[in-house]
Image (cartoon, helix red, strand yellow):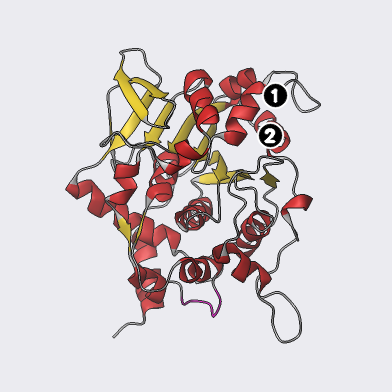
Amino acid sequence: MMKPVLVLAAALAALPPAAPGATPVPAVFDTDIGNDVDDALALAMLHALESRGECRLIAVTITKDNPWSAPYIDLVNTFYGRARIPVGMVKASGITPQASPMIEVPAGRKRADGSFVYPRRIASGAEAPEAVALLRRALAAERDNTVAVVQVGFSTNLARLLDSGPDGWSPLAGRDLAMRKVRLLSMMAGNFADPKPEFNVQTDIPSAQKLFREWPTPIVVSGYEIGASILFPASSIENDFGYVPDHPIAEAYRNYMKMPYDRPTWDLTAALYAIRPGRGYFSLSAPGTVAVDARGITRFTQEPNGRHRYLMVNDAQRSRALEVMILLASQPPPGGE
C-alpha cells in the first residue's frame, strides 16, 4: 500500500500547473487569523498556488486584534519559504482580541535547545506595520488592474483603506488607489441562502456597510452557505500533512478543536475563486448590489450594472472544489516533497 505522502505527491503531479507564460496574480490576503482554522487552510492554499506560479502573495493583513496573529502568519510564511511576505496588523481596533490556542500553541512551541519549532521574525503583533499603510505600499507597487484581494475576516482594514489619504507610497486617496490597482475583491461574508447575520459581517457592521457601499471594483462574495456545504475532512489533516514531523497548519487545526472534526471551507472558497475564477468550481449569481443592514444581515438586489455577485455551487462543483482545496492546502512547500 502506498504511503499517504506518496499518494499526495502523485496527486499533486496530476494537477495542471499554470499556463505557460501566465503572469502570477498579485494577491493580498486580509484575515482574522485565530478566530477559525479555515483562515490557516486558505493561507496554505495561497502558498501552494504561488508555488505553482498562479499567484504571488504581496501582503497579508490582519483584522484580529491579538498579539499572536502576526507571529503565526509570519511563521507560516516562513515555513513555506516566503519569510519575505510583509505582514500588517490592525491597530487599536479592539476587535476579537480573545486568546486563541490555534495560533498561540504553534507560535510558542520550542525545542529542547530553546529554538522555535517554527522560526519567525515577528515576536508580537506590535512589531508588525499598520495594516492600511502596508496595503497602500503593496498596492502602489503593482501594475494597474492586477491585484486580487482576498478578504476572509472583517472589513476593518479595507474600510480604513478607503478613507486613507495620499502618502509617500502613492499620491492617490485610498478609494482611487484601490480602483486603479485592484482587479477583484473576493470575500467570505454574509449569507445569501438564509437572512441571518454572519460572523465576519456582524463583528464590524459599519466597516462592512462602508465596504459594500463604496468599494470601487468588482466584488464576489462567498456566503456562509457555500463553505458550510463543503467540509474539509479531518482525515486530510491526519494523513496528508505528515511529510514533516511538525506542520503549522495541521497543528493549528488540532489546537482549534478536539480532533477529529470536519470544518467548513468558508475562507478556502474565497481564496480559490480569487486565483482561479474561470475554472468552474463555482457559479456566479447575476450582477447586483449587496447591502448590509443594522443587524449585519446581507441583502442582495439584482441590478444589470451592479458590481457585486455571490458564489453558487452544485453537487458536482462541491466535489471538484473539495478535492482541489484538499490537494492545495496540503501541498508541501517548494522542495518539501
Residue 158 location (% of width, % of height): 59, 31
> Is residue 41 something that shows in the picture?
yes
Is 85 magenta? The answer is: no
Residue 9 location (% of width, % of height): 40, 70
Residue 186 location (% of width, % of height): 45, 35
Helix, strand or loop for the magenta stretch, by majority:
loop
Labels 2 & 1 near each other (Cβ < 8 A): yes
Residue at 54% across / 64% down in the picture? Answer: 102
For the record, the magenta segment spans 242-246
Identify the amino acid type marked 2.
Answer: Val
Identify the amino acid type marked 1.
Answer: Ser
Among the 4 quarters of the image, the one containing residue 296 = top left
First of labels 2, 1 by sequence position: 2
Q: Secondary structure at mark 1?
A: loop
Tell me if mark 2 has few (under 14), some (14-19) or many (20+) residues whose alpha carbon lies within 10 angstroms of its own.
Answer: many
Residue topped by disc 1: 164
Residue topped by disc 2: 132
Q: Nearer the viewer, residue 156 or 180?
A: 156
Q: Is residue 111 left or right of residue 298?
A: right
Q: Is residue 194 left or right of residue 48?
A: left
Residue at 71% across / 87% down in the picture? Answer: 112
Quarter of the image with the N terminus is: bottom left
- C-alpha span from label 2 to label 1: 8 Å
Q: Secondary structure at mark 2?
A: helix
Q: Is residue 138 above or below residue 243?
A: above
Q: Nearer the viewer, residue 9 or 32?
A: 32
Among the 4 quarters of the image, the one containing residue 307 = top left
Residue at 64% across / 29% down in the picture? Answer: 160
Residue 166 location (% of width, % of height): 75, 20
